[in-house]
Image (tube, rainbow, N blue to C red):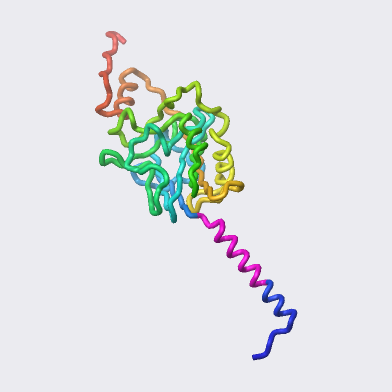
Amino acid sequence: MPSLPRTRSLAVAAAAAVTLTLLWGNLAVRSPATTSWSGGDSRAPIEPAAQLPTEFPLRLELRLDEPMHVYVASHDLVRGTIAMFPSTTLRSDLRPNPLQAGTHVLPGTHLGKELAWHAGDGVGGTTFLVVASRAPLPEVASALRACRQMGNAAFPHLPVLGTYAPSTGMENTPARTHFAHPLLEDAAKAALQGHDGPMVAVEGHDGVFAAALRVITENPTPPSSLEQATEQIRERLGSALPFEAAPAPAGK
């Protein structure tokens, strides 16, 4: 078989080297995690910048190729950072970090009911951030414990979680202008251009991947009467409502 000219041989070798380098680079940053957000009873996909009703149920399907330490939080300028997973007030079948390889639906189930986070409290723009790390992130976990917590500790029978003050007190919550930890800020900046699908590598943080979803929650219509306000509370809390609506004064 005739040999290739030297110049062509060098070109072929160089092309092969470039191809191997690209393949190795792709393998090095290949995402080990994929996210998919859905909402409501229909489990419809959530589009970026979607306008959602107050307390619209949200769930996250997370597919992991390997065990990962997972952190989920939201941020808005009214409430600041809210810890969603892990959360000190979440009662769920999900095991503590790290989550094992496989498919997980967060925030999990409790008392036979599938749980859901809520989209917001009528605060406008809200960013939901997912961080998956091959190693634990103790500083991130500590920062999230000082934030508001989303969970079901007070009302474990409700499928849609509520928001609670942290055990350390509201006076110690981080600043509301940004995510509660610099790594979370870096992750949000890296992920906001993407959406559902493979999580993106966070530059400067080896083995850390991120995904984000930004939505808009509408301001709720205020109740027009005590009865309507009580009914709205009853719809949220069901049998846990501890009082009955007071009768309206005569002639009112």
Identify the residue at image location x=24%, y=27%. Answer: 239
The residues colored magenta run 15-31
Quarter of the figure with the C terminus? top left
Q: Is residue 44 left or right of residue 182?
A: left
Locate residue 221: give its quadrant: top left
Q: Relative to the observer, which residue lies in front, 215 or 177?
A: 177
Identify the image quadrant of the N terminus: bottom right
Q: Which image quadrant is residue 235 in?
A: top left
In the current view of this chain or complex, which residue is farthest to the top? Answer: 250
Q: Nearer the viewer, residue 52 or 178?
A: 178
User: Is 42 situated left or right of 124 in this image?
Assistant: left
For this rendering, which residue is in front, 148 or 37?
Answer: 148
Q: Is 69 left, or right, of 105 in this rendering?
A: right
Q: Position of residue 97 (x, y in %)?
A: 41, 44
State the image coordinates of residue 164 (x, y, percent, origin top left).
Answer: 40, 27
- Please give the count of numbered marks on the rendered protein: 0
Q: Which residue is at 41% across, 29% downward?
A: 163
**Residue at 48% of width from left, 44% of height from top?**
136
Give the main secondary structure of the magenta stretch. helix
Answer above or below: position of 94 versus 166: below
Q: Residue furthest right?
A: 7
What is the x, y in percent for residue 102?
39, 54
Q: Is 153 contained in the magenta span?
A: no
Q: x and y percent of residue 222 in the render?
A: 41, 23
User: Which residue is found at the position 36% from the left and 39% from the top?
Assistant: 116
User: Observer-nearest residue: 87 or 248?
Assistant: 87
